[in-house]
Structures are given as structure tokens and as C-alpha cells.
Amino acid sequence: MSDATVLFADVSGSTRLIQTAGDAVALKAIARCVERLRKAAESTGGRVVKTIGDEVMVLFATPDAAVQAAAKMHATIAALPAVGDTKLGVHVGFHSGPVIQVEKDVLGETVKLASKLVEQAHKGQTITSQQTAALLSPALKPYSRELRELAVRDEGDGVWLCEIVSQAAATAVVRLTYRDQAIVCSDEHRSVVIGREYGCGVMVTDRTASRRHCTVELRGGQFVVQDHSTNGTYVTVDNEKSVLLKGEDLALRRYGWISFSDVRYAGADVVQFSCG
């Protein structure tokens, strides 16, 4: 038995992609993601233990290496184009502790907890335990943030979850502009709700918008927009083709528009965003 850091990375959005694009297209896209996750892990010193469908299990010598791998994983998957209306992502969980190596496989309580942590992570998010976060180097500890307690045993014992955010996220901002409103989402103000309801951070008047239409928030080292609406949220990033989100989220970069219908014309009701 020896100590190591076990990381699980799971492709986000794969189930919906299979439903909307069919098995052949979805499996090809998922395989491409898994290969990118493998390369990101190996480039940071990880050993890929196995792949399980759309999930990768990796062994690292230190939690610092796992943090570096997670950042590369998020970046390499975020760089891929959407497949139809689905933008795939990744969520990551890792934990450090004693492991039992049986031939090429790795077993033990550390593995079990790491697998539970990845289940708690959202698309674009990296989760670890408070115990593992305490083992990070002084350079990385400032980017660990305590979230909540997770019950992991029937007796009620639990583990505190921590989110790992990127250094860029610690200082980055996204500016949202709608008519005469201007809101900044940042490390200090991490989420903004957009909708018609009074009290939303950005109140819109477009009748196609829901009362609480979508949320822009800082998550897992990047800004994302998450749809909560009835009709869906249309997002245009950097003049690329508009993506329709239905209960999903999408990473924001550079600049673009968030709209409430696919009608685009001069003066259309849109929320502009600008990152950085």
C-alpha cells in the first residue's frame, strides 16, 4: 500500500448528445474527448489506470499534479467545437490517500472517495476533499475554496468538499451589458441571474425570456452561462454560430451575446458579455 492521488474525469453532456445526435456521432465525439483527457493526464505526469465509458481514472504522485491535469483537461475539452446543439465539457474529482495497486488496477477507499467526488462536480468544475486541499503546495492553496459537507458513509461521517479554481479565474471578470444596465461578475460577485423577474441581476423585458431565464457564474475556473428557461438560451461566442442551450451550460470566452430567441436583427433584445 502506498499514497497517491486518484483523479476521475467524466465527460459532461454525453447522455444528451447520444439522445440528440445518435450513437455513432456521439460515440465518436466522446472518444475524441477521452483521448484528449488521456493526453492531458499524461502530459502532467499522470498514469491512466483505465477508461470506463466516458470517464477516465488517473493516478498521480501529488495533488499538485492533479490540479495541473484538471486545468489542462478543462481547457482542451472547452476548445472543442459544439456537436450539433451540444457543447461537451468535463467535470473532475480527485482525492489523495493510501491505494492498493493490483497489477495495473488501483483499489481502496481513496479510489472510492475520488469516484464520489467527481459525481459532485458540475460541468467545468474540479472538486477535491478538504484533506487533499490541505496537501497542496503554498502556490496552489489559495485557489482551493471550501464548499459543503458530503455524507459518504451510512453512519453519517462526511468529508468537506473543496473547489479548485484556476489562477485566471481569481482575477478575471465578465461584464454583462443590457440597454442601460451594466453588471460585473467576478471572484467577489460570482453569479448573476438574467430574466424578467424583479430582483434579477440583469432584468430584461423580452417577452420570450423566462422569469429567471439563465445564470452567468464563475465555476471551475471559468465563466459559464446555465439555462433555466422554458424556451432555451441562445449564446453566440466570438461571432461563432449561435448555440441553443436547454437546461445545459456553456463556457464563455472573449465576447458575445446571450439572447432569448433565434431572431437576430438590428436592435434585437440581447445581453452582451465581455470576458477579461
Image (spheres, helix red, strand yellow):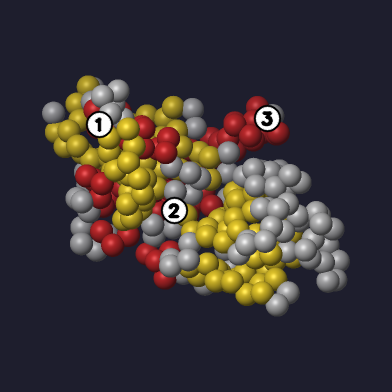
Task: Tell me the SS state at disc 1.
Answer: loop
Residue drawn at the location 48% of the way across and 49% of the way down: 124
Mark 1 and 2 residues: CB-CB less than 8 Å, in contact? no
Question: How far separated are the C-alphas under marks 1 and 3?
Answer: 38 Å
Question: How far separated are the C-alphas under marks 3 and 2?
Answer: 26 Å
Mark 1 and 3 residues: CB-CB less than 8 Å, in contact? no
- According to the picture, the residue beneath numbered tag 2 turns out to be 220
Mark 3 and 2 residues: CB-CB less than 8 Å, in contact? no
Relative depth, front residue between 14 and 42: 14
Residue drawn at the location 62% of the way across and 75% of the way down: 182
Relative depth, front residue between 14 and 187: 187
> Amino acid under label 2?
Gly
> Amino acid under label 3?
Gln
Position above or below: 16 against 227: above
Task: Tell me the SS state at disc 3.
Answer: helix
Q: Tell us which disc is closer to us: 3 or 2.
A: 2
